[in-house]
Structures are given as structure tokens and as C-alpha cells.
Image (tube, rainbow, N blue to C red):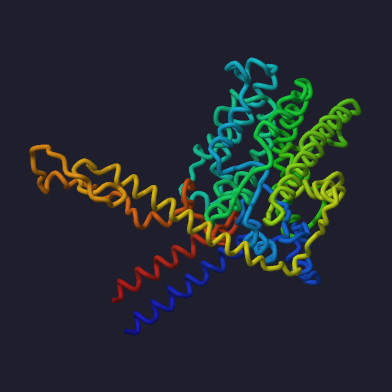
């Protein structure tokens, strides 16, 4: 009995140590170390469009939602739950959107990258991608490996079919093949998580842009400028490889600024535009001029012009549906700096103000009723479709009732039906229609990992493994002594 008590205490202490080690491996933003700054007073990325009912703008970044979700203020999450309509830049849950994004990156007429790139740049690119492929297993986090992700699979998911892509998209791909970016793969980014959550709880979702409106500006960049950008990107990453240094501005830095509520437009514009910063003071004057010209082109096409277009479509929705509440989730860079979406709406007469993290969000009663009614309608439609599908799978000619429950008129067929004619084999592992009726229509059910479940760093992994070994040893001692 004493052995059992001791073993139980040892197991519990080991589990407690494992939880503490796992929590310590998660890097916290630098603002957490500033004890003089109250977290509740940090800036938020929420803006309110004052009307009845109110609507909201929310600035996002393209990182795994688990890295930022705990730092998003509660009033922002409440505004998301209140709104009956959620709109994004693109509909990331639509297969057509994903297919179109992949197709717009390909070279036309079946051409290969080796046909359009200078040979020296092509060879350097191939060598760098081979280096990344070899380093990928070491860059992956213990959490990614524990969830069954393989380095080759992850590399192919990011860089697969790279020889068929346009040079500008290869440049963006190379810029994302860093250790910090690799560690963040495998979990939905914040935009996608919000879209999946909105669909799961029965909200109306939509998009204000088409895929072509994001792809065409990148594909129309001058070819000589594309070569310059790709060449500079390769030079930067080759320098990091040679010196074993780190990228000067990483995804980790972006997450820190976002979690601390740093409303700096320069930080988030490049994340919103999804392009690297090519301007470097160490460049010769002629190359520096070219880098500034490319940076200006990206800002004009991917930020300024899109801000105007997106704001016009937002205003169209607001005017067309004055009694509906909207939640617009766009990249944070679209709301910061000059000529933003906020500026365009304010110039058009809308009252848009920044919402502090401790500001109260009003309750929209009729939106709650509409949402409940919409969920009931979705379940009813889904149940009817499933019952219709079940009915169509049966031998309807052999049944005495039609699908409306009315008795059929008997026909003089000359024969009498037996029980075996009415029996249809149903597979034992077939669907349970009554259970599946709870799933909303047209949307695939997605299982989301709970927040704070995953760690994205390898530091402390060896300590965690030691704790697991200690736990196994404790269990073995228990069974041995019992």
C-alpha cells in the first residue's frame, strides 16, 4: 500500500514538472517583461464603425492563431461573436480560392523556371533550396514532429513544384523558408481560424476581393525588377547561411509587436503585402534606387490601391444592409499609416474610431436571435437533405409510402411483395444520419487544437524528454514493487 501511495505521488509530481517545462518553452513577448505596463492598457487592433447596430474592423497578421489568440482583447472576441456577418480579404475556406491562388503562381504555357532565369541565379536558387531541405528536420519543432509532420512532407508543401512557378512567387517562397517560419507551419493562421470559426457557428461569411486582384499586381512587376528582387533575396539568405546569423526581422518579431499592440504601420505593411523589404543602406546607390522603386510599387499596388478598392466595397455592404452588423477582418497594415481603409470611410462620412482593449462592446440582441434562427434553419435543411439521400438509397418502388408519407395506390402487378423485397442492406460503418444532422451544411467539420496546447520551440525539449523518461521509470518501479 505504501508503494502505491509513493508511486502515485511520484507520477503526479512528474506530470506537474512536465507542464511547467512545456509552459517555460513558450516564448513570451517582450512586453510581458515590462511590469510597469498594464496589459489591459495595451493598444488593440479593433475599430468600431458607429451605427445601429455597430460594425467592426479587426487587424490580423498571417501567423498561427495559437501564437496570438491569448493576447487578443476579450472585447475583440466579443465583437466577433456579436456580428452576424464576417468578411475577409479572400474566402480562404473556398476550394476555388486555393486553386486560383496556386494557378496564378505558375509560369504560362507550361514553361519552367530554368527557361526564364539566368543560369547563375537558377543554380544558386537550386543550391539554397537543397540546403533548406537538408536543414528542415533540425528546424522543425518537437511539437510538429509529435503531431506526425515529416520534414519532406513540409518541404514539398511549401516548395513543391517550385520550378514551374513565376520568379516573383519563388522570391516570396525563399523569403518564407526560414527557421522561424518553418516552426510556425501546421496550424491555421489567424485569418483562416476566424473564417472556420465563423462558419462553424453559423455566421454569414464573405470576401471583399478576388484572387486575381491580389495576384495580378505581383505578376505584372517588371521582369528586370523581379530578377533584382530575387537576386537580393538570395544574397541575404546566403549571407545568413555563411555567417550562421539570424534574419534581422523574423516572424517572432512580428508576433511580439502584435501581441504588445504596437500600432506601427512600417512593421505590419510588409506582412500585409506579403513581400520582403529590399531596401538596404549597404546597397550601392544605383541598386538602392531600384530597391526603393520596387518597394514603392509594392506599397502602391498591394496597400494603397487595395485600401481604396476594399473600402468602397465595405461601404457598399454597410449602405445596402443598414440593419446588419459586420465584422471585417483584414491585414493590420490596411488600417495603419496613411490612406488607410479607416481614412477612406471617415472621408465618406462614417464615424470610425479606435476601440481600446478595455472598452465595452454593446450587446446586439436581434443579432443573437437571427443567429439562433439561422442555425435552426441550417440544421433543418441538412436534416432534410440527409433524409432525402437516405430515401433515394432505398428501393422506393417496393415501399408502400412515398417520401411525403402518403400511401401509394396499389397497382395490379400480379405479384405479392415479400419482406426480403423491402429489406436493403445498410453497412455497419455507415453514417448515423441523426447524429450528422447537427453538422452545418456545405462546411467540412474541422477540429481545432486548443489554445496553449502547442509549443513552437525546441529549447527545453531535452528537459521535457527527461521528464517523460522519469515518468516511465516511475511507472515501471510501481509495477515492479507491486
Taking 115 as reference, is 379 above or below it? Answer: below
Quick one: 77 or 145, which is closer to the camera?
Answer: 77
Q: Residue furthest right?
A: 285
Q: Residue furthest left?
A: 415
Instruction: Identify the residue at horizontal 75%, vertical 37% (top origin).
Output: 276
Report if residue 146 is visible in the image.
no
The answer to which image quadrant residue 11 occupies is bottom left
Is 327 or 123 nearer to us in this picture? Answer: 327
Q: How many marks?
A: 0
In this view, the residue in front, 60 or 151, is 60
Comparing 283 with 73, the one in front is 73
Image-based side of 225 in relation to 210, left or right: right
Measured from the top left, where is residue 170 in percent x and y? Answer: 66, 29
Instruction: Name the image quarter holding the C terminus.
Output: bottom left
Task: Give residue 33's position: percent from left, percent from top.
Answer: 75, 66
Q: Quadrant of the N terminus?
A: bottom left
Q: Residue at x 54, y 55 (%)?
A: 202
Could you tell whether 322 is left or right of 206 in the image? right
Q: Is residue 113 above or below residue 198?
A: above
In the displayed image of the protein, which residue is found farthest to the bottom? 2
| Left or right relative to 477: residue 285 | right
In this view of the protein, can residue 16 be seen by the observer? yes
Q: x, y (%) of residue 185? A: 58, 46
Q: Position of residue 415 (x, y in %)?
A: 8, 39
Q: Is residue 149 left or right of residue 5?
A: right
Residue plotted at (59% across, 64% down): 368
Residue in the picture at 72% in, 54% down: 322
Q: Is residue 288 above or below residue 201?
A: above
Amino acid at each position: 500500500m505504501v508503494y502505491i501511495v509513493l508511486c502515485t505521488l511520484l507520477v503526479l509530481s512528474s506530470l506537474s514538472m512536465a507542464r511547467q517545462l512545456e509552459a517555460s518553452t513558450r516564448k513570451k513577448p517582450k512586453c510581458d517583461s515590462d511590469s510597469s505596463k498594464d496589459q489591459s492598457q495595451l493598444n488593440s487592433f479593433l475599430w468600431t464603425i458607429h451605427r445601429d447596430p455597430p460594425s467592426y474592423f479587426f487587424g490580423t497578421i498571417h501567423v498561427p492563431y495559437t501564437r496570438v489568440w491569448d493576447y487578443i482583447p476579450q472585447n475583440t472576441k466579443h465583437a466577433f461573436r456579436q456580428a452576424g456577418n464576417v468578411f475577409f480579404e479572400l474566402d480562404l475556406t473556398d476550394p476555388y480560392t486555393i486553386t486560383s491562388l496556386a494557378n496564378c503562381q505558375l509560369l504560362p504555357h507550361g514553361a519552367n523556371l530554368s527557361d526564364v532565369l539566368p543560369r547563375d541565379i537558377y543554380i544558386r536558387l537550386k543550391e539554397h533550396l537543397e540546403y533548406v531541405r537538408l536543414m528542415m528536420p533540425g528546424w522543425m519543432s518537437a511539437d510538429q514532429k509529435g503531431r506526425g509532420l515529416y520534414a519532406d512532407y513540409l518541404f514539398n508543401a511549401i516548395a513543391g513544384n517550385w520550378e514551374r512557378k513565376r520568379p516573383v512567387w519563388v522570391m516570396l517562397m525563399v523569403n518564407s523558408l526560414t527557421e522561424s517560419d518553418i516552426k510556425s507551419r501546421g496550424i491555421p493562421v489567424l485569418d483562416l481560424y476566424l473564417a472556420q470559426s465563423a462558419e462553424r457557428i453559423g455566421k454569414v461569411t464573405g470576401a471583399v476581393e478576388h484572387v486575381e486582384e491580389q495576384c495580378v499586381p505581383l505578376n505584372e512587376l517588371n521582369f528586370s525588377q523581379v530578377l533584382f528582387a530575387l537576386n537580393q533575396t538570395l544574397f541575404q539568405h546566403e549571407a545568413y547561411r555563411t555567417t550562421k546569423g539570424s534574419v534581422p526581422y523574423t516572424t517572432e518579431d512580428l508576433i511580439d509587436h502584435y501581441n504588445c499592440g504596437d500600432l506601427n504601420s512600417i512593421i505590419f505593411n510588409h506582412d500585409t503585402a506579403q513581400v520582403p523589404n529590399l531596401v538596404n543602406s549597404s546597397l550601392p546607390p544605383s541598386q538602392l534606387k531600384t530597391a526603393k522603386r520596387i518597394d514603392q510599387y509594392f506599397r502602391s499596388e498591394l496597400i494603397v490601391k487595395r485600401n481604396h478598392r476594399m473600402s468602397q466595397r465595405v461601404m457598399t455592404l454597410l449602405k445596402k444592409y443598414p440593419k446588419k452588423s459586420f465584422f471585417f477582418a483584414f491585414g493590420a497594415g490596411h488600417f495603419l499609416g496613411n490612406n488607410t481603409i479607416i481614412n477612406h470611410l471617415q472621408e465618406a462620412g462614417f464615424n470610425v474610431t479606435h476601440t481600446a482593449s478595455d472598452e465595452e462592446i454593446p450587446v446586439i440582441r436581434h443579432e443573437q436571435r437571427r443567429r439562433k434562427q439561422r442555425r435552426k434553419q441550417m440544421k433543418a435543411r441538412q436534416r432534410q437533405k440527409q433524409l432525402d439521400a437516405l430515401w433515394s438509397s432505398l428501393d422506393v418502388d417496393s415501399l408502400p409510402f412515398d417520401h411525403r408519407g402518403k400511401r401509394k395506390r396499389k397497382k395490379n402487378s400480379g405479384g405479392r411483395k415479400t419482406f426480403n423485397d423491402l429489406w436493403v442492406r445498410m453497412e455497419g460503418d455507415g453514417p448515423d444520419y441523426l447524429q450528422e444532422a447537427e453538422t452545418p451544411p456545405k462546411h467540412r467539420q474541422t477540429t481545432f487544437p486548443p489554445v496553449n496546447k502547442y509549443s513552437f520551440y525546441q529549447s527545453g525539449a531535452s528537459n521535457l524528454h527527461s521528464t517523460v523518461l522519469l515518468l516511465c521509470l516511475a511507472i515501471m518501479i510501481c509495477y515492479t514493487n507491486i
